[in-house]
Image (cartoon, rainbow, N blue to C red):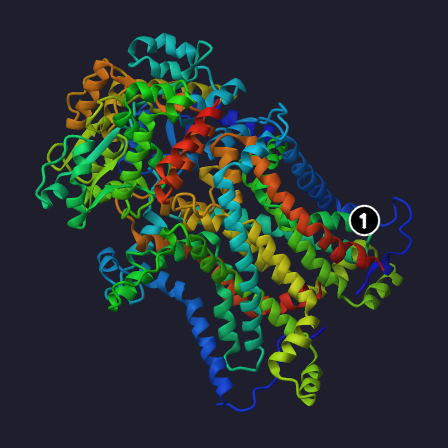
Amino acid sequence: MKTMTHLLASAALVGATAAHATDLEVTHWWTSGGEAAAVAEFAKAFDATGNTWVDGAIAGSGGTARPIIISRILGGDPMGATQLNHGRQAEELIEAGLMTDLTELAEAQGWKDIVNPPSLLDACTLDGRVYCVPVNIHSGQWIWLSHGAFEKVGLDVPADWNEFVAAAPKLEEAGITPLAMGQQGWQQNLAFGTITIAIAGIDAWREVSVERNADTAAGPAYKAVFEAVANARELARNSNVQDWNLATNLVITDQAAGQIMGDWAQGEFQVAGEVAGVDYTCLPGLGVNEVLDTGGDAFYFPVIDDEATKKAQMELASTLISPEVQVAFNLKKGSLPVRGDIDMSSANDCMQKGLSILADGNILPSGDMNLTADTQTQIEDLMAEFWTSDMSAADAQARYVDIIASAE
Amino acid sequence: MVDAVTPRGPKPRRRFSRANVMLYGTLIVVAAYYALPLYVMIVTSLKGMPEIRLGNIFSPPVEITYQPWVKAWAEACTGINCEGLSRGFWNSVQILIPSVILSIAIASVNGYALANWKFKGSEVFFTILIVGAFIPYQVMLYPLVIILRELGLYGNVWGLVLVHTVFGMPILTLLFRNYFTSVPEELFKAARVDGAGFWGIYFRIMLPMSLPIFVVAIILQVTGIWNDFLFGVIYTKPADYPMTVQLNNIVNSVQGIKEYNVNMAATLLTGLVPLIIYFASGKLFVRGIAAGAVKG
Amino acid sequence: MSSSSKSRKPSGLFRNMSAKIASVPMVLTALVVFVGGTAWTVLYSFTSSKLLPKLNFVGLDQYERLWSTRRWIISIENLAVYGFFSMIFTLVIGFTLAAMLDRKIRGESIFRTIFLYPFALSFVVTGLAWQWILNPDLGIQNVVRQMGWESFTFNPLNDPDIVIYGILIAGLWQGTGLIMVIMLAGLRGIDEDIWKAARVDGIGTVKTYIRVIIPMMRPVFVTALVLIASGIIKIYDLVVAQTNGGPGIASEVPAKYVINYMFRAQNLAQGFAASTMMLLSVVIILIPWAYLEFGGKKRG
């Protein structure tokens, strides 16, 4: 039966290749307003090549979507292309020979020279071969502040995390939730990571997250981090929402004063018609240590034994990284482009901040590249519990140390 | 067989006794608790968002709007697909029909063989099957991915049909086995004397006698399969997602603010098919359950 | 009622051939999926498989880690609390409602229809409906506060200590109707003479139910228990739809842990170890029962 379908499919495709129209199913988990608008740019550009983008959006966060994507690839019914965060997530799939090798295309188009920072392409590379196309740079280390909320209590918009914490009591008096926080482990973990960089500094962060040094994790610098997070937990007590964009919406509507969230939050402000620097302010690295990690999204192309599909996959790969598409997509998404050679002058205030940090090279590798999904899940579970219970900072730190000590 | 519909309990003595008032009072309060969520879903789905934000979830809509229903059915978005739930509805229908037919056909024959044609080891397999009903699906998810991949059925509707047949088998087989066991032995013996074989007796005697249990099985399977979420999400691709999965997608892909009215309309739409079947067949359902499940 | 006499002398492979052929799907399901799949999962739970199943045995490492994971402990506690109360309340409510409906009341079919309809709805629908009703800003809490009781607090879904009861409310709403119907059918199967005899002897109604009727309905209770128990262990969709395990990890359940580690954390073996533990508890409770109920006794 399967062979039959294959025969029929390839027969249909042989006919179709001449007309250059191959349907390519693309799975991703970009479903919020800003994200959907951005992904539509991809679809538009790909359709313009004569092929058809068949959208396979999977709602929920990556946590919901990844199992579906992976089980489909393992189940022998892969999609034409799929979003995955690059880094260690796809390693085993590549080792099992399930992902298409893009090295030829990468060399032909000189990705090595255009992708900036180079670590993005490195994350796509295994044993010298390229397996994915990075499409954007996402950084998590931002706090988004509502001008309206601070105006209401007659305070200036804080310039860093410490000022923000100092302003909290006044905000609370006025019935404004100081910190909006979605009750999901990955968001709480993101906030934890961001606070770490601001409080403990980059060196300590690197020792723990990259080198997995449990002693540093048990040390005084991280003690201060956990105390700061315990404090932030109190600031977020009244934030009852689950999804990150609902939390962002609290900031947009001035119900909350700030949110620690990645640069993708910017897409939501944009959809709501807010202007950076006027309606809201963004502080990279919480305004303390202005660094960004260079995580991001990438597209992988599962191996499909069909010439027309392969061709379409290559076309999609080169579409995704082409200059025009990079500009259009990233402006909508609020993320930074993966190539340093394009004109982003139309980007807003916040993106410019990000671009200049990038240009200065103040970058960190992202968690996805350092820790396995397994370790990250454990940390997320810990953070989920820590943020929603009355666990003491010391207990949380002790358990964090255990996780880091056993990480691979 | 026992007439399953006539009440057998003790007769209440007087109409307005204190016990009677308590009885009806309790029943009405409990009934309100059961009816409440449906009522709340309906009124919420007919309100506009401003009214929801200001109002009371129990109050009827001041201004009735059908827009949420239209949006839920045809316009709600997941990513850049804005087709609403309609696509999921037809997917569910396509999954449902073969799954119900196949699972019931197989389970009824199983039950019949177990009740009337025992062979060495049949009870052992049956015991395994019943224990299997308790095994959390999660335990077998991964092996099933492998099995379906080897059969070349992964990711298409037939793979999902097979999964539903497998997981529906324990409870359905139990149902049919118990029912067929209660068929008077004389009937079976007489047919054997007449020379009827396994299939002859099944089709000519057992099948016509067991309409009620088939109705129960159909109701159980239609609701079970229509309401499935886990298998739909794991064993199909987005283009084939059943309605429940799409519902979850629509409710969870929040763009801007949560539209509770659209969510509730979508929720009701998803529940509509099993509800209609249930309301249309309520009495048969009860009758069938009485005939089958009780004789355990 | 025994039926084994119908198939006396089960001699030879070809006796009952049609029945054996007809049972092939059942045998395959039992052996390949249930036994085979389970054995496979158990075997791989002793490995260090990550994203792909690989046979690198690591002994009991996965189990050690499992039992030192806070989230797993919380999941087990939640399942125990949910299971205990769900079992008791479903049986008590189901039986009580059935007994009330059995008292020749008016409008029986209306009541029955109302009690049973939630059973037709999926857990996803149930979870979303109750999430909405229990929403603190717009649901019951808000309504009571609007009526003037400003300090009223009923916000189970955002309180880690009681969130599992919020799920229990929804679960009971969905599942009690079925048990009521089964109980009702059982009551209808009881001879009216029993009631007459009880009345003649002057035994009270409640006493009759407890002393006479319930013991007579043992098979019905067994069926009901089977249905409730299998539902409890599988609880997954309801939690996903209603709270998604939150707030934090306060309403996690074992089935969710399994899926989460198998797919999301890409640690298959850890998920397998968790599912094996679930299985173990099922086996310990059920094997003796299944043997008594379906194995030994019926052979006579």
Percent across and percent down for residue C276 are 62, 39
Task: Place residue A392 in its image quadrant.
Answer: top left
Task: Compare residues A251 and A82 and report the one nearer the observer.
Answer: A251
Task: Compare residues C271 and C159 and report the one nearer the observer.
Answer: C159
Image point 16% across, 49% down: which residue?
Answer: A173
Image point 60% across, 53% down: which residue?
Answer: C230
> Which chain is home to disc 1?
C
Outermost residue on the left side: it is A154
Mark 1 burial class by Cα count in 10 Å: few <14, some 14-19, many 20+: some
Query: Which amino acid type is shown beneath numbered disc 1?
Result: Ser
- Judge from the rendering whether residue A348 lies leftward or rightward of residue B193; answer left or right: left
Q: From the image, which quarter does the C terminus of chain C lie in?
A: bottom right
Task: Place residue B5 in its image quadrant.
Answer: bottom right
Image point 77% across, 58% down: which residue?
Answer: B115
Image label count: 1
Residue A273 in sight here: yes
Q: From the image, which quarter does the N terminus of chain C lie in?
A: bottom right
Residue A57 in sight here: no
Task: Compare residues A326 and C32 and report the one nearer the observer.
Answer: C32
Q: What element does badge 1 sit on?
A: helix
Percent across and percent down for residue C45 are 61, 32
- Judge from the rendering whether residue A406 lies leftward or rightward of residue A280; answer left or right: right
Percent across and percent down for residue C274 are 57, 38
Percent across and percent down for residue C229 are 60, 55
A342 w.r.t. C205: above or below: above
Which residue is disc 1 drawn over?
A: C18
